[in-house]
Amino acid sequence: MNSPKFYFLFLMIAFIYSLDFTIGFMANKFYFSEKSKANDPLIYSITKSEDGLVVFGSSRAKHHYNTKMMTDSLGISSYNFGYGGQTIYYHEILLRNLLEFHTPKIVILELMTIDFQKTSLQREKGKLNVLLPFSGYSKVINKELGNIDKYHKIKSFSKSYIFNSQAYTIFRNNCLPYNNRLNGYVPIFGDSWPKKIHVDNSVNDRLNYNEEKIDKIYRFIETCLEKRIKLYICVSPVFLKYRDKSPYTDIIQDIERKYGLKVFQFSEHPEFNSKPEYFNDPLHLNASGAKMFTGILIDSLKSDAPNLFVDGKFF
């Protein structure tokens, strides 16, 4: 081999590796800074949570469960792990990761149709890429990402790969951090839903089920039971009228029959189904609706497990 070409190739490889290592090192340092851990709900939920009550779910969890209100009313530190657009694949991974370093006393899972019905492949697993920065931090997450992408292990040789598309997040968390004073809960401020109640014409039967998702729901439940965590599965209010039966009917019956759990079905609660002023859209409560719902939920928790509370406070 021509020596000058060999040395040039060697220097290029060394330069690329050094650049990749440096970018990855700096990205890791700032992505997992103390500001990020304290203020970014995603980073906090995966690296730092020691809360007694934790809420899992998609955007409906994020915007419906006022965990600051729960902390104040129940006397137990509470945090909202909700993440918009994610499904039971994400929630189940987050639960197992949390249990690697902390076991909460109470877990609430907001169940949504995307958690058990068939959806697009991108909806089902593609959005788990949001967990890439944690693949070097969490064995649970790294293994699951490897199961989804057979090239994940090879790609991870690049130290900067896992931080692709995270420049804005790193800048925001360190320079313009969230004011995370509501324990992960994000209220939706805005006008009430201006239209009549939405009619859902879907045919809701078991043909719509994704069996792999159902298995993940069962695994989530069984993990909580094995760890002696008090689990509440909830369906929060919607401004919908189903022409067919509710899509939650069969899955709720299956869960209650299989595990003896009571599922809290609030989707057609009379306090909400005639009040558009509580909704931002047919699926999401606004801040006023979330406050009302959280109050009802708190009363339900106290009634369901009075032995967990003394004078209304967790002990």
Image (spheres, helix red, strand yellow):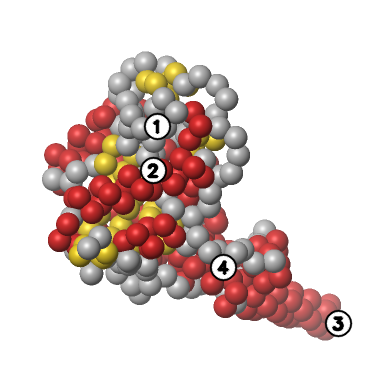
Q: Residue at x 49, y 55 (%)?
A: 185
With 111 as the anchor, is 86 left or right in this view? right
Q: Earlier in the sequence, mark 3 or mark 2?
A: 3
Residue density around tag 3, few if under 14, some if 14–19, many if 20 or more, within 10 Å: few
Please tell me whether mark 4 or mark 1 is closer to you in this view.
1
With 267 as the anchor, is 41 left or right in this view? right
**Mark 2 residue element:** helix
Q: Are marks 1 and 2 in contact (CB under 8 Å)?
A: yes
Q: Quadrant of residue 199?
A: top left
Q: CA distance from mark 4 to mark 1?
A: 32 Å
Q: Earlier in the sequence, mark 4 or mark 2?
A: 4
**Mark 3 residue element:** helix
Amino acid beneath label 3:
Pro
Residue 191 makes an appearance in the image: yes
The residue to which callout 4 is attached is 39
The residue to which callout 3 is attached is 4
Q: CA distance from mark 1 to mark 3?
A: 76 Å
- Front in this rendered view, residue 25 or 110: 110
* Residue 35 placement (x, y as % from top left): 60, 74
Q: Are marks 3 and 2 in contact (CB under 8 Å)?
A: no
Q: Earlier in the sequence, mark 4 or mark 1?
A: 4
Mark linked to residue 7: none
Q: Residue at x 29, y 69 (%)?
A: 103
Q: CA distance from mark 1 to mark 2?
A: 9 Å
* Residue 230 placement (x, y as % from top left): 22, 58
